[in-house]
Image: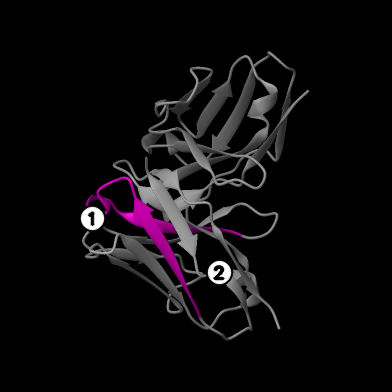
Amino acid sequence: SYELTQPLSVSVALGQTARITCGGNNIGSKNVHWYQQKPGQAPVLVIYRDSNRPSGIPERFSGSNSGNTATLTISRAQAGDEADYYCQVWDSSTSYVFGTGTKVTVL
Amino acid sequence: EVQLVESGGGLVQPGGSLRLSCAASGFTFSSYSMNWVRQAPGKGLEWVSYISSSSSTIYYADSVKGRFTISRDNAKNSLYLQMNSLRAEDTAVYYCARGSGLNQFDYWGQGTLVTVSS
């Protein structure tokens, strides 16, 4: 089965840049999507197809995907960006797969 | 505005059954695939099941295959999840989520809590 690995936590200073990685075998050949989930709330799609932002998502959120690693980048981090972030792909053998999740803390 | 509202969660004993519903509005329900995704307390997201727009294609996670059944009624703009033979490890918040073109989930409901305990 296909697996996606994320760091448990990432800390970032206010106004600085946070990078959250998502590792998977040849993930660069897949479409990667990213979700933000704040405590007690439903997930929200923040990046789809590696690097595209849905309407309403700030330009501070960006994504990339190559080789065995996809990356979500949060520029000029704000206190409101504190949340759990999940990557997700579709795999022909496993169907829909979520990453293990990363807790982002803004210091 | 797209809205997805889940209902039907609650406390059920191990081995019992429960039926979840998801009422959709604000979009042409019959044109979109739908999914159930769950999240155990303090844990990550786990995809549960997928149904295509016409119900012709259905997928399940291995963890629920043979016990859960997904269905939809496009005339009622509703999605369902029939859960049988429930186990303690099925305890979770269950979200319905709209599927989109590249297999992402672009809209989510607020979730309904299912607790399996004696």
Identify the amino acid type marked 1.
Answer: Ser
Q: Residue at x 35, y 45 (%)?
A: B103
Q: Is residue A93 visible?
A: no
Residue in front for this viewpoint, A11 or A76 = A76
**B57 vs B118, nearest the viewer:** B118
Image height of A87 relative to B13, above or below: above
The answer to whether mark 1 and mark 2 are in CB contact below 8 A is: no
Is disc 2 surrounded by few (<14), some (14 to 19) or many (20+) residues within 10 Å?
A: some
Q: Quadrant of residue A22?
A: top right
Label 2: which secondary element: loop
- Read off the residue under disc 2: B9
Residue type highlighted by circle 2: Gly
Give the main secondary structure of the magenta stretch: strand
Up/down of A6 relative to B22, above or below: above
| B22 magenta-colored | yes
Q: Position of residue B2 (x, y in %)?
A: 37, 43
Q: What residue did someone put label 1 on?
A: B30
Give the number of the disc on residue B79: none
Query: Which residue occupies 52% across, 48% down?
Result: A98
Which region of the structure is painted magenta? B18-39
Q: Chain of mark 2?
A: B
Picture mark count: 2
Of the pair A13 and B31, the residue shown nearer to us: B31
Chain letter of mark 1 equals: B
**Residue at 24% over, 62% down:** B74
How far separated are the C-alphas under marks 1 and 2?
Answer: 24 Å
Question: SS at mark 1?
Answer: helix
